[in-house]
Amino acid sequence: MAFAPRPPRAAARIALLTFVTTVALTACSDADGTLTEVTATGTTTGTTAPATTVSSPSPSAPVTSSPPATVKKTKNPPDKDKGTNPGGTAPASTVTSDVSQLKSLGITLDEGVLIDVADDGLDRYLEIGENGVDFTGTSKKDTTMMALKPARVAKRTEDTKNRVVIAPPFWNEDVGTGSCVVDKSRGVLDLATCKAGALDQIWEVVPAGDSGQFELHGAHTDIRVEAGKITTDGQGYVGLQTIKFAG
């Protein structure tokens, strides 16, 4: 029995048709959302569809911006070394320095004293002069009478003990803040209105053994004395002592 050949239309229905299609679409729109460019490309096996391109002038690419960088602010730690901030004040100066060690060594506090150069064999007293403060005093008088008083500090710690201010009683008799010896600059001492916690008015009393002698270290100056003058060249006597003014 003979089979009639299939009609071309039936053969087309069962023909294997393989399409490999790659479509790339690029679309740009104006601010109002209007499509301005679409590009499509296609490739088929067996049947090829024509590429269709619709284009119009492309607008400039939109400008984008990154969010601003965040800057973390940090506080600098407070300065602790002598002289790093001599014109400032100790923060929250609400307590007085621990000076119990000084009292136990026989260093006179809170009353009139002469501050004497201990080992030079002469009478060299700290004195208020016309041109500042120096060790030019040679006798008891108003200008050589001093008083060491506990300084006000932020809190009592090992780093703040044995701190005093030098307040000459003759300049502190009237009601008011009075005057204190200030370490104005290296080797230069003067009088200034007392200000609680002022770093350039605070002196560290450094005991020299157990004899009652001590050194004075200020914001700028570690006291050394040669021939009645404070020196800055490393020469001179450093040992000082208190002598009761009324003694």
Image (cartoon, helix red, strand yellow):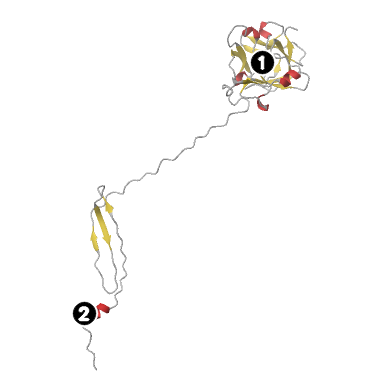
Q: Residue at x 24, y 81 (%)?
A: 11
Q: Position of residue 55 (x, y in %)?
A: 23, 56
Q: Position of residue 67 (x, y in %)?
A: 40, 42
| Residue at disc 1, secondary structure | strand
For residue 15, side relative to residue 216 (left or right): left
Q: Find disc 2 in the rendering and name its residue.
A: 9
On the image, which quarter does residue 210 sit in? Answer: top right
On the image, which quarter does residue 26 sit in? Answer: bottom left
Which is nearer the N-term, disc 2 or disc 1?
2
The foreground one among 179 and 118 is 179
So how many labels did they put on this image? 2
Answer yes or no: do the residues labelled 2 and 1 have beta carbons within 8 Å? Answer: no
Looking at the picture, which amino acid does disc 2 mark? Answer: Arg
Looking at the picture, which amino acid does disc 1 mark? Answer: Lys
Q: Position of residue 61 (x, y in %)?
A: 31, 49
Q: Find disc 1 in the rendering and name its residue.
A: 149
Q: Is residue 239 visible?
A: no
Q: Residue at x 27, y 79 (%)?
A: 14
For residue 69, side relative to residue 86 (left or right): left
- Spatial separation of the CA atoms under disc 2 and disc 1: 120 Å
Q: Residue at x 21, y 83 (%)?
A: 7
Answer above or below: position of 24 versus 10: above
Q: Quarter of the image containing the N terminus?
A: bottom left
